[in-house]
């Protein structure tokens, strides 16, 4: 049997990783597609596809100039996959309750579960990432500042929502 038929899926994925598919190609394609889509949809620079593609190409390549994007994507997407698994399990468990239209509280429960998953993903992503070249950023050290910021934002929301004429 020839050599190329003896590779497993894991071997192929390792080869792709060695070729930079996950660190450079996929992040580039994602950034290019999002920037191009935003420019095309907004018509900010007119309806010139060449200009939109050139700007999207430049933004995609410039964003990969250093390894910040590759490291960030390599950190955030595995945690996002775990969060999606948690949401899937919650969906299965909520499916056991039935599909009753009287359960209007489920949208709030879904929002809460999704928000918690989002915050956990961000927390673990930022605690394991390198920021500004100063080494590993430790979210645990900044937790009081983060909580104080959340309290200030909560007070601002309360004032804006509760304010009268």
Image: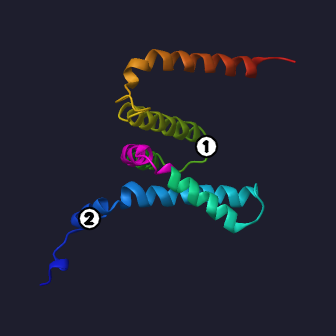
Residue 39, image x and y in percent? Answer: 69, 57
Q: Is residue 51 above or below residue 160?
A: below
Q: Is residue 37 left or right of residue 1?
A: right
**Looking at the image, how many numbered discs can be counted on the residues?**
2
Q: Secondary structure at mark 1?
A: loop
- Write down the residue under mark 2: 15
Q: Secondary structure at mark 2?
A: helix
Disc sitting over residue 61 in the figure? none
Q: Is residue 31 left or right of residue 82?
A: right
Q: Quadrant of the C terminus?
A: top right
The quadrant where residue 117 appears = top left
Residue 81 is one of the magenta-drawn residues: yes
At 38% from the left edge and 36% from the top edge, which residue is drawn? 129
| Front in this rendered view, residue 61 or 85 | 61
Q: Position of residue 74 (x, y in %)?
A: 37, 47
Which is more toward the observer, 38 or 80? 38
Q: Nearer the viewer, mark 2 or mark 1?
A: 2
Look at 56% across and 21% down and name the residue there.
150
Q: Which residues are magenta?
A: 63-84
Where is residue 90? Give x, y as percent. Answer: 42, 44
Nearest to N terminus: mark 2 or mark 1: 2
Instruction: Determine the residue located farthest toward the right in the rendered image.
Output: 165
User: How busy is the neighbourhood of tag 1: few (under 14 within 10 Å), some, or many (20 plus)?
Assistant: few
Q: Is residue 32 magenta?
A: no
Q: Residue furthest left?
A: 1
Residue found 70% across the figure and 61% down from its top: 40
Give the crowd class for mark 2: few <14, some 14-19, many >=20 residues within 10 Å: few
Left of 7 or right of it: where is 140?
right
Which of the pair 1/44 is nearer the observer? 44
- Where is residue 156 shown, x and y percent of the image? 68, 19
Q: Is residue 75 above or below residue 34?
A: above
Residue on which the image places disc 1:
102
């Amino acid at each position: 049997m020839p050599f190329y038929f003896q590779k497993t899926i894991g071997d192929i994925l390792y080869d792709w990783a060695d070729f930079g598919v996950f660190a450079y190609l996929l992040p580039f394609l994602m950034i290019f597609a999002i920037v191009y889509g935003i420019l095309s949809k907004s018509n900010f620079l007119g309806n010139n596809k060449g200009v939109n593609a050139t700007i999207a190409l430049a933004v995609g390549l410039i964003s990969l100039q250093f390894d910040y994007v590759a490291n960030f994507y390599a950190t955030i997407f595995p945690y996002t996959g775990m969060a999606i698994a948690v949401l899937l399990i919650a969906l299965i468990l909520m499916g056991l309750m039935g599909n009753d239209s009287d359960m209007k509280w489920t949208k709030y429960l879904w929002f809460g579960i999704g928000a918690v998953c989002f915050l956990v993903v961000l927390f673990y992503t930022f605690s394991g990432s390198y920021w500004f070249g100063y080494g590993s950023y430790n979210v645990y050290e900044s937790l009081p500042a983060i909580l104080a910021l959340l309290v200030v934002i909560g007070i601002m929301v309360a004032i804006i929502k509760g304010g009268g004429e």
